[in-house]
Image (spheres, rainbow, N blue to C red):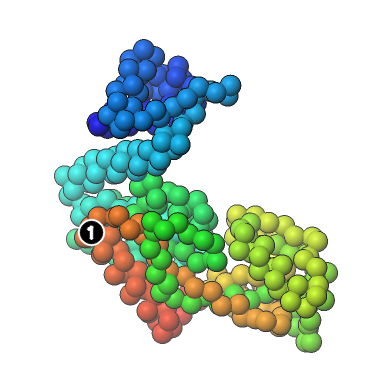
Amino acid sequence: MELRHLRHFAAVVDAGNLSKAAERVFISQPALTRSIKNLEDIVGAVLLERRPRGMVPTPAGDALYRYARLMLNEAARARAEVKAVQAGARGELAIGMAAMFSDHIVDRAVAAVCGAGRDVALTVTQGFLEELVEALRDGRLDIIFSNLSNMMLPNDVVVEPIMDISAYVYAGAAHPLAGAAGIDKALLLGQRWAVVDQPHMRDFLDHYFSADGLATPEFVVRTNSLNLIHSLVVNGGFIGILPEHVMQRRTLRGAVVRIDAPGCPVMRKAGLITRKSMPNRPVVNMFVAELRAACAADAYGAWQTADL
């Protein structure tokens, strides 16, 4: 089995069409057909079948596709790392992170591994947990640092919680609930909410209100942008539940205030997610060490002044 076989096979699965796949890999359609047949002979299984909607993988093809994607991405990453080292870098590293850590923890670890004499060819991808895990599994990412939800993760990844996150309900300084005492969930239910568009937040809101026999809020804006949530809270009369470290600087500037909501703070874990089959690479170990150091320093308040 050669990489070209896997590249051709993955192209057909992705395109769902032999002629389009042939264009993508720059060979003729008959040559592509022969390549797929050779691969089927090598693995001893039919990998593709024609359906009304195009070429689709068989169950055996589905099983091979994930390995094909992983091997192709790993090969591309290997070439990139060799190129980076040849150019004088310590190695190549692809990191995935949750949006809430873009200017907290991850920025310090990135600055450390890219410091003088430790230059790394580094790529950082921001996203939500589900999409980051998929990129990790197919080899596009080396490691993820994210808040950890209750979602069931596949058994080919390793999760290591390393820090706690405190989340509170926030409102703009001019919001009617700002500074109010005795706030109950029934009062919160009637407010306009802005929250991250993730399953764990839907589950949280459902559980938070149903625990007191209440329905889920009807007026909820869901978005993948923390900046939009902040803007809606500050200027739009919304309330939102957000990590304390994300809002710390903004609360001190008087733009938003923490609401005395029942059941807060909501405590969650954040940590590392890696692939079980990931090779032991010094550049990854170096980043993990710096990430742990940044988390430890944050836990002891060493970065508080810098955040202000």
Residue 157 visible (yes or no): yes
Q: Which x, y percent locates residue 89?
A: 21, 52
Q: Nearer the viewer, residue 57 or 146?
A: 57
Q: Nearer the viewer, residue 64 or 24?
A: 64
Side (left or right) of 63 relative to 50: left
Residue 107 visible (yes or no): no
Side (left or right) of 9 relative to 285: right
Callout 1 environment at 10 Å: few (<14), some (14 to 19), or many (20+)? Answer: few
In the displayed structure, would residue 298 be above or below residue 44?
below
In the displayed structure, would residue 131 be above or below residue 47?
below
Q: Which x, y percent locates residue 205?
A: 70, 68
- Which of the 4 quarters of the picture holds residue 18? top left
Given the current orientation, which residue lies at the most extreme front position? 44
- Which of the 4 quarters of the picture holds residue 176? bottom right
Q: Which x, y percent locates residue 185?
A: 78, 77
Residue at numbered disc 1: 280
Task: Please name the amino acid that badge 1 sits on.
Answer: Asn
Q: Name the secondary structure under disc 1.
A: loop
Residue lying at 35% horizontally and 57% vertically, measured from the top left: 275
- Which of the 4 quarters of the picture holds residue 86? top left
Given the current orientation, which residue lies at the most extreme bottom position? 182
Q: Nearer the viewer, residue 125 or 281?
A: 281
In the displayed structure, would residue 240 be above or below residue 65?
below
Q: Which x, y percent locates residue 208?
A: 71, 73
Residue lying at 45% horizontally and 16% vertically, measured from the top left: 19
